[in-house]
Amino acid sequence: QVQLVESGGGLVQPGESLRLSCAASGSIFSINVMGWYRQAPGKQRELVVTMTSGGNPHYADSVKGRFTASRDNAKNTMYLQMNSLKPEDTAVYYCNADITVVARSTINYWGRGTQVTVSS
């Protein structure tokens, strides 16, 4: 059984920062691509960033220059440093990962999400 658990969300004012974490646990052989997605009320879920195990990130245009993703492969954890937050960044942020489990099958997992609210 594999779990993705997000943490670090909260309520901040415009211009402030937050750091999200996503920790994977369970019967993991390896983690391939990890990513963050977000879903605002009334909108579809959208990509924020994906990152390969080699550390090559791909950002959505809307967050380039403000958000920075990183991974600690030894801890099966991905981070998202969010700076200069804007009200339009308000959403539930979800972690996603392609994980090869010990049985050698690769499965896509989602976390339950963490709320980020940017408001004055």
Image (tube, rainbow, N blue to C red):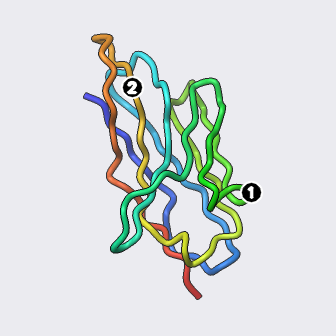
**Relative horizontal placement of residue 84, taking residue 1 as reference (left or right):** right
- Say which mark, if any, is on residue 26: none
The amino acid sitting under disc 2 is: Ile
Please, what secondary structure does the residue beneath circle 2 have?
strand
Q: Which residue is mark 2?
A: 99
Q: Residue at x 37, y 68 (%)?
A: 43
**Relative horizontal placement of residue 35, taking residue 110 as reference (left or right):** right
Q: Residues within 10 Å of mark 1 (few under 14, many from 20)?
A: few
Please, what secondary structure does the residue beneath circle 1 have?
loop
Q: Residues within 10 Å of mark 2 (few under 14, many from 20)?
A: many
Residue at the far right in the pictured view: 65
Q: Residue at x 70, y 69 (%)?
A: 84
The amino acid sitting under disc 1 is: Gly
- Dots 1, 2 in contact, CB < 8 A: no
- Say which mark, if any, is on residue 65: 1
Circle nearer the viewer, 1 or 2: 1
